[in-house]
Amino acid sequence: MTFAAYLAFLGLSAVLALTPGPDSLLVLRFSVRQARSGVAAATGSAIGTLVWAVLVGVGLAALIEQSAELYRVLKIVGGLYLVFLGVQAILHSRREPVADEVGRVPRASVAAAFGAGLLSTLTNPKVGLFFLAVVPQFLPTDGPAFPITMLLGATVAVVGFLYLAVLAAIAARATVWLKRPRVAKTIERVSGSILAALGIGTAATAFEG
């Protein structure tokens, strides 16, 4: 793979990272509570991306694409998990004091944030299909494909992590506005509703065709 081709893939990775998705919503939701939790969610998402890169490298993603039943199950699982995260966020906004009288926000578990980011990406078949559709265009026609696949996968993971980490830092620093009780509750409810809607849409597409 030439340097020019790698730069082109790097630009494509940046566009993918900037496209809003469940990972961005998760990072925003956790960052309102604690910057470290937002970064942890971003780390989980990045590792999930690397796992998908490995799966593509060994040909498992191709099997998922060819197996309609396996792909359908994965979409249903991913959709249900997003619905769970969305409902959880909405319930938290109603039952928990998002901020106290001096503006402090209850901290979210770093481990829970990491797990949410990891599982959200692992159960998103679109990530694997992205690698399956795009990565082959950058692979050499002669030579081992696995190392190049991992390089491209690491590129997507790093670019995505950097964007989400910056998003977490910005959200966490906007404490004066974001951590107001009404604003924080609104973010919880809106992001939760969007996650649930994405989950329902993802699960519903499993029954199309």
Image (spheres, rainbow, N blue to C red):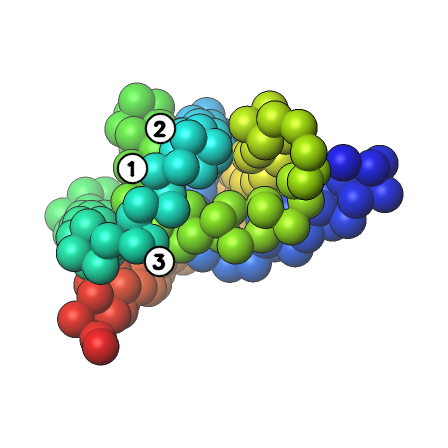
Q: Which marked residue is nearer to the observer: mark 2 or mark 3?
A: 2
> Which residue is at a point 22% across and 77% down the rendered structure image?
209
143 left or right of 23?
right
Residue wearing tag 2: 114
Provide the secondary structure element on which disc 2 rests.
helix
As measured in the structure, the alpha-carbon distance from the residue carrying label 2 to the one carrying label 1 is 9 Å
Location of residue 198 (image quadrant): bottom left
Amino acid type, label 3 = Ser
**Amino acid at the residue labelled 2:** Phe
- The one of 64 and 44 positioned closer to us in this rendering: 64
Neighbor class of circle 3 (other Cα within 10 Å; few <14, some 14-19, many 20+) is many
Q: Vertical placement of 187 versus 3: above or below?
A: below
- Taking depth in this image into account, of 112 and 74 the one nearest to the observer is 74
Is 113 placed above or below 23 here? Answer: above
Quadrant of residue 87 within the rendered picture = bottom left
The residue carrying mark 1 is 119
Q: Is residue 57 visible?
A: yes
Residue 159 pos. (x, y %): 63, 38
Query: From mark 3 to mark 1, how far is it between C-alphas?
Result: 17 Å
Circle 1 sits in a helix, a strand or a loop, which is it? helix
Question: At x 31% / y 45%, what residue is drawn?
Answer: 63
Nearest to N terminus: mark 3 or mark 1: 1
Q: Residue at x 51, y 58 (%)?
A: 20
Numbered circle sitting on residue 137: none
Quickly name the residue at label 3: 191
Camera-side mark, 2 or 1: 1
The answer to whether the residues at label 2 and label 3 have Cβ atoms under 8 Å apart is: no
Q: Secondary structure at mark 3?
A: helix
x, y percent for residue 173: 58, 38
